Image (cartoon, rainbow, N blue to C red):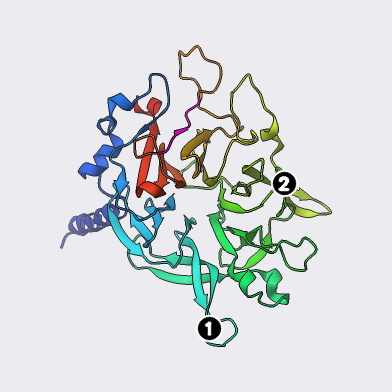
Amino acid sequence: MKKSTYIIILISIVCASCDFLFGTREDDITKEIFEEGAIDPELVPAEVGYVPVLPFWTGFSNPVDVYCGYDEMIYVIDDNGLNVMDQAGNLKDIIFIQGATDVCQDRRLHTYVAGRIDIDVDGDGVDENLAAVYRLTGTATGNVSIVDTLIHPFCDVSRNITSFRGADDELVEFTGVTTLADNTLYIARKGPRNDLAGIARTDNAVLIFTDEGVNTSYANGLSPVSSNLRSVWNMSSVVAFAAPPQTLSGISTSPDFLVTLTAEDAAYKVLWIQQNFDAEAGITYGENALLASIDLSKADRFLYEPGRFSNPADVYAAPDFTGYIFVVDAERDSLYQFTRRGYEGVNPPPGSTGTKQIIASFGGTGEGPFQFREPSGVAYLRRVVYVADKGNGRICRFTLSTDLE
């Protein structure tokens, strides 16, 4: 057999594999994502704003999270577990994870899912139901394996010197997972025990793990019981700034992260937490003071505007040139968009007479293309925003009208 024949066969195998992972551009559904024909002209705003990319993906049972992976797959968490889809919306696999609520992926293509696990802690034959984070490999290829499970409280090194707390530990939840560029894992945790004088860490905390699941520290310096600009009081999600796709220009190496808070009395419910270093105190975490300044000449609404949110369920930071921050509010049934400076809205288009950010946030209760019922997850990939619309059992997709030109 000639050498050129071997090359043709190899190319065919590789292309077939790519079609499985990413979907083929020849697929009719995939074409709808990339062509303006998927946009209803009647839904395009006069100046600038988000428009729905149709069709929305339906048939889910209470979808609570959506994530766009480094492997270019789309991951959806619903009652059935982890749904693995290509970018055309074709379902490739469903992986059952007990009590799954959140998903992310690191640059090794290891997938993390926050959920629950039943385990006999005392050896008395009675299982306790505990918070857990599962680390999976092979989610895009169908050769799935659970390579590690981080279980509360045993994964927290500070709890090695304390006993199991029974019902209190069963009330603890892992409410978010996210990874950094070096595959460090952050886990958002909330629970009933938050004694600042205790020998173990408070339940309300962001735990930090190595890429092999070793707990090294936590985000020290954040308040677990009060509302301020450096709070982790009843977190509903956490997200870092490293995100797909991988590009030649690099990926964010920032150790900072965003959190959403659901404590009813919290004035500020979406926070940018910065990592700081002090020669004496070492690494600590605190507020991003730049977002606290309100400049009415630049925008009318702000990320740190008190009372801006009711029940923010998820947050995501776009890794591209836009740098947009997206928030979904499950109580207000809305999607919000901000810049990295905290201004709500997008830049005025060329030729516009406006000088302020143009509000592009939208929502309302219902089943329409701009409405939601308890949106619980948000993600972003290549100028497309994905929303897990829990109450309507669908994944909604949106893009800016200016990106259609």
Q: Which mark is residue 383?
A: none
Relative vertical location of residue 197 with respect to residue 87 in this rendering, above or below? below
Residue at 46 percent across and 40 percent down: it is: 333
Relative vertical location of residue 38 with respect to residue 296 in this rendering, above or below? below
Q: Is residue 382 visible?
A: no
Relative vertical location of residue 102 with respect to residue 265 in this rendering, above or below? below
Relative vertical location of residue 53 with respect to residue 121 in this rendering, above or below? above
Q: Toward the viewer: 26 or 237?
A: 237
Disc 2 on helix, strand or loop? strand
Q: Is residue 14 left or right of residue 180?
A: left
Q: Is residue 340 visible?
A: yes
Q: Which residues are magenta?
A: 359-365
Residue at 80 percent across and 63 percent down: it is: 197
Sequence order check: which comes first, mark 2 or mark 1?
1
360 within the magenta span:
yes
**Residue 143 drawn at (x, y percent):** 34, 68
Q: Toward the viewer: 153 or 195?
A: 195
Q: Is residue 138 left or right of residue 321?
A: left
Q: Check disc 1: other Cα within 10 Å, few if <14, some if 14-19, many if 20+.
A: few
Disc 1 on helix, strand or loop? loop
According to the picture, the residue beneath numbered tag 1 turns out to be 126
Residue at 69 percent across and 40 percent down: it is: 288
Q: Is residue 37 left or right of residue 341?
A: left
Q: Is residue 299 left or right of residue 202?
A: left
114 within the magenta span:
no
Q: CA distance from mark 2 to mark 1?
A: 41 Å
According to the picture, the residue beneath numbered tag 2 turns out to be 286
Q: Amino acid at mark 1?
A: Val
